Amino acid sequence: MKNNNGVFYLPDLPYAPNALEPYINEETIMVHHFTLHKKYVDQLNAIMEKNPGYQEYGLVELIQNVEKLPADIRTGVFRNAGGVLNHDYYFDMMRPAPNDLPAGKLGEAINKQFGSFDNFKKDFTTAAMAVFGSGWTWLVADAAGKLYIMNTENQVTPYSFDRIPIIPIDIWEHSFFQQYPAKRADYIEAWYNVADWAKADVLYSAL
Ligand code: MN
């Protein structure tokens, strides 16, 4: 996220670092949010500080207008702005268990498009298991509100495909390897217990 001075910052977690236990443990959150998420923020600020003139640009604007930036900073901005944006979503869209299944407009849309939450979950898990290397699985929407499950590589965001993020799961090994060594399937199953579907519904309903 970005403050009024044009500087990007690490958002506060909307829960205590140990509040997602036993599904995602405190050590994982400490490293993942306070070290790795913060690193993307610091790296992005370091680049933008040396390249004044883009203070108006938020994360999405930087990602979508990356070709307008000086050639030597494009890759760094694209990767780090994506890293900040993706992690902002990931940590914000979790909550302490127990959670509820998607309700409201999002629940209706999931049932309509996927048949049921269970069917959606099957497809989402299959997509997350299919990520090769480092990446993300997303529930996203288009401008008309149609839902899609999509994967993005590295720190690419759904905005590169004109899709609007609703809720992501981080599939980089740093999100689970400490707690679930080499067990991506267990991590994905655990994540469903802390996915904040109520917040996802608020996002989706505001489209
Ligand atoms: Mn991550």
Image (cartoon, grey):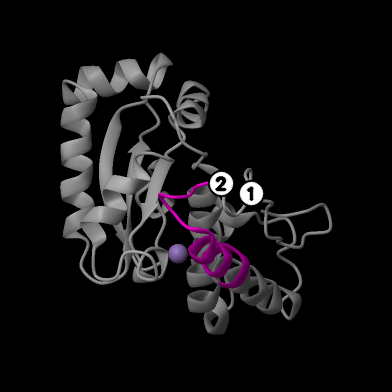
Do the numbered discs 2 and 1 sit on residues whose CB atoms are within 8 Å? yes
The residue wearing badge 1 is 16
Residue at image position (34%, 50%) is 161
Point out residue 105 in the picture as x, y percentages from the top left corner. Answer: 40, 16
When the figure is inspected, residue 174 is found, relative to residue 14, above or below; the finding is below
Q: CA distance from mark 2 to mark 1?
A: 5 Å
| Closest to the observer, 23 or 129 | 23
Q: Residues within 10 Å of mark 1 (few under 14, many from 20)?
A: few
The residue wearing badge 2 is 19
Point out residue 41 in the picture as x, y percentages from the top left corner. Answer: 64, 68
Q: Is residue 14 magenta?
A: no
Image side of residue 131 versus residue 32, left or right: left
Disc 2 residue: CB within 8 Å of ligand 1: no
- What amino acid is at disc 2? Ala
Point out residue 177 in the picture as x, y percentages from the top left corner. Answer: 35, 70
Image side of residue 38 versus residue 179, left or right: right
The stretch in magenta equals 19-35
